[in-house]
Image (cartoon, rainbow, N blue to C red):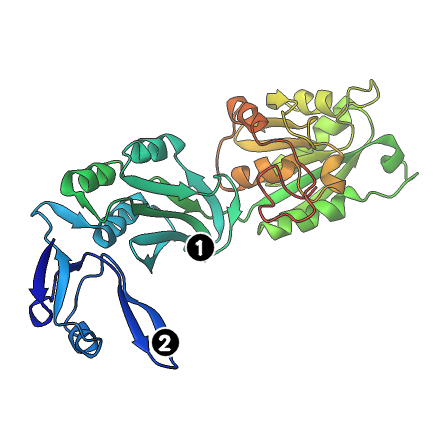
């Protein structure tokens, strides 16, 4: 540290907080440690009775926390991510558009492997709204070396928001009780609402008996009609009368997985009919606010090719705790 005249302090960095007292109006920290003195601060400091200041004398390769955070955040921010400066060395990353949040966890780990850099985010693969807080960063010391910032910048962009595609969705509802009119289908309306919330439209709903060939024909008919994603409901259990998985396979769908480490949603099926994703949805999707549907379908709508390995990874976080108040509804822990 060194002492300088207030009039000569422009551009220097305060070594400690400075308190201002205005009787009956204000008492508190007027300038924080690390504040860079600007020309407009000089009159205020003089009215506070300051003739001299203790300031930090940084080295030529030192980077102030404000500049370091700006640069690290700017390097980390990818598609549809905006920066918001919060002061005192903190910068937040916000969604600049609605979409699916994607984060590279390995890149994040490499970044914070440096103990002088802090970066925290929400979970990836959740649907976020424009303006939503995604992450925040700062450096721990008041100054870091230029080499620290350059290393952080070299990791590149690893936070992005991918807009969801407005897909035409085909729906196949199976079950003899519905096909023969013994009970009324309720799944269709639920899925129309769920897909609409993500910006997509159920273009057509077909009904099939518990018959492999009929289920397969409905799937192929919807693909021929231009469906970009096909959802099949009903008959997803291991009961011998539940023919949906067999019908999906008979349509030529390459099944990635039948079963998922998610509750609710264990009897989930995912496959592809050429480039068209096909999902077999268990009954829980109709009854639960958050289920396997919300963990997988947004990724498909974002154009991601979800694999069996992606589904396996849902085991960590795939248990819904039926929280009374869910502040993070698409994480797998949310309100059921």
- Residue 100 left/right relative to 202: left
Instruction: Tell me, for residue 26, which label it has, or none.
Output: 2
Instruction: Please identify the quarter of the rendering in which residue 269 is found.
Output: top right
Classify 10 Å Cα crowding around label 2: few (below 14), some (14-19), many (20 and above). few
In terms of secondary structure, where does tag 2 sit? strand
Which residue is at 51% across, 22% downward? 309
Nearer the observer, 228 or 213: 228
Q: Earlier in the sequence, mark 2 or mark 1?
A: 2
Q: Quadrant of the C terminus?
A: top right
Residue extending furthest right?
182
Q: Is residue 251 visible?
A: yes
Task: Look at mark 1 in the image and give the residue it sits on.
Answer: 97
Instruction: Tell me, for residue 264, which label it has, or none.
Output: none
Nearer the observer, 74 or 234: 74
- The image position of residue 285, as x and y in percent, is 71, 38
Nearer the observer, 180 or 142: 142
Q: With respect to residue 85, does 312 lie above or below?
A: above
Nearer the observer, 26 or 334: 26
Classify 10 Å Cα crowding around label 1: few (below 14), some (14-19), many (20 and above). some
Question: Closer to the observer: label 2 or label 1?
Answer: 2
- The image position of residue 94, as x and y in percent, is 41, 53
- Residue 117 left/right relative to 170: left
- The image position of residue 229, as x and y in percent, is 59, 38
Instruction: Please identify the quarter of the rendering in which residue 259 is found.
Output: top right
Residue extending furthest top?
240
Find the distance from the CA under tag 2 to the CA under tag 1: 40 Å
- The image position of residue 39, as x and y in percent, is 14, 72
Proximity of marks 2 and 1: CB atoms separated by less than 8 Å: no
- Residue 69 left/right relative to 298: left
In terms of secondary structure, where does tag 1 sit? loop
Which residue is at 28% across, 68% downward? 19
């Amino acid at each position: 540290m060194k002492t300088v005249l207030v009039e000569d302090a422009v551009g220097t960095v305060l070594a400690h907080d400075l308190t201002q007292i205005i009787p009956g109006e204000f008492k508190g920290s007027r300038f924080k440690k690390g504040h860079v003195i600007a020309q407009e601060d000089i009159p205020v400091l003089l009215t506070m009775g300051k003739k001299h200041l203790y300031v930090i004398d940084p080295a030529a390769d030192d980077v102030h926390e404000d500049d370091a955070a700006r640069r690290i955040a700017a390097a980390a921010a990818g598609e549809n991510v905006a920066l918001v400066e919060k002061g005192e060395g903190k910068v937040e990353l916000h969604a600049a558009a609605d979409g699916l949040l994607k984060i590279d966890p390995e890149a994040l780990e490499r970044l914070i492997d440096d103990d002088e850099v802090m970066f925290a985010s929400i979970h990836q693969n959740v649907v976020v709204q424009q303006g939503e807080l995604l992450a925040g960063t700062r450096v721990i010391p008041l100054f870091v070396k230029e080499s620290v910032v350059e290393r952080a910048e070299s990791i590149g962009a690893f936070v992005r928001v991918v807009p969801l595609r407005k897909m035409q969705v085909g729906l196949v509802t199976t079950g003899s009780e519905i096909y023969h009119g013994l009970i009324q289908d309720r799944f269709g309306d639920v899925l129309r609402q769920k897909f609409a919330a993500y910006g997509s439209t159920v273009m057509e709903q077909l009904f099939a008996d518990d018959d492999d060939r009929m289920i397969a024909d409905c799937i192929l008919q919807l693909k021929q009609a231009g469906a970009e994603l096909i959802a099949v409901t009903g008959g997803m259990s291991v009961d011998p009368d539940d023919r949906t998985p067999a019908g999906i396979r008979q349509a030529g769908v390459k099944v990635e997985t039948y079963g998922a480490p998610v509750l609710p949603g264990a009897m989930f099926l995912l496959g592809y009919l050429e480039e068209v994703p096909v999902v077999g949805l268990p009954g829980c999707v109709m009854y639960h606010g958050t289920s396997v549907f919300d963990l997988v379908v947004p990724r498909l709508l974002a154009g991601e090719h979800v694999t069996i390995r992606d589904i396996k990874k849902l085991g960590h976080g795939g248990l819904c705790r039926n929280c009374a108040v869910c502040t993070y509804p698409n994480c797998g822990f949310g309100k059921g």
